[in-house]
Image: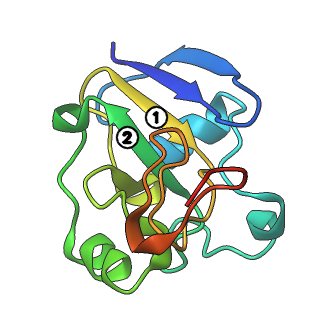
Amino acid sequence: MPKITFSKIKDKEKKVAEVPQGINLREAMIKHGVEVYSPLHKKLNCNGKGLCGSCRVHVKEGMENCSAPGALEKLRALGSFYAIGHEEEVRLSCQMTVQGDIKIEETPDFNLHGVDRKAKNTRAGYFPEGEAR
């Protein structure tokens, strides 16, 4: 059975769950008590239809063990600010099935500038607080 490692940046909380192969990631997250939505989107979401993008996750490891993105998911990501700087790892949990072990970051922060604060990326002329220019 595949293992999913869930993590959050802010809380540094990790949880590992064994799931059946082929399970929808959003369903697995709900079943194992993992937060799917940010507080605002707990009521304002599309209930897993792939329309709103609020169930997005970053797949940190094991992208090869995820189902390929469908047309709806690709279309949704095209016009979405949340994918800036994370085009290769952002997925919608409602549109993805788990085929093997993966590590994901749930409810990632909105990233308008494409800046990875941990890597101190200064793309687009943006500098994290407290850094010299």
Q: Position of residue 107 (x, y in %)?
A: 63, 50
What's the residue type where badge 2 is placed? Answer: Val
In the image shown, does 54 or 111 lie closer to the viewer?
111
Pointers 2 and 1 in contact (CB under 8 A)? Answer: yes
Residue, x 21% and y 46% (percent of image)? 67
As helix, strand or loop, the secondary structure at mark 2 comes to strand
Residue extending furthest toward the bottom: 79
- Residue displayed at 25% across by 74% down: 74
Q: Amino acid at mark 1?
A: Ile
Q: Where is 105 relative to 86, above or below?
A: above
Q: Which residue is mark 1?
A: 104
Q: Secondary structure at mark 1?
A: strand
- State which tag comes first along the sequence, 2 or 1: 2
Question: How far apart are labels 2 and 1 at the CA level?
Answer: 4 Å
At 65% from the left edge and 34% from the top edge, which residue is drawn?
8
In the picture, measured across the screen, residue 29 lies left or right of residue 129, that is: left
* Residue 2 pos. (x, y %): 34, 17
Q: Which mark is residue 59?
A: 2
Instruction: Find residue 6 and report its horizontal and vertical position in percent.
Output: 55, 27
Coordinates of residue 61 in the picture (x, y in percent):
31, 28
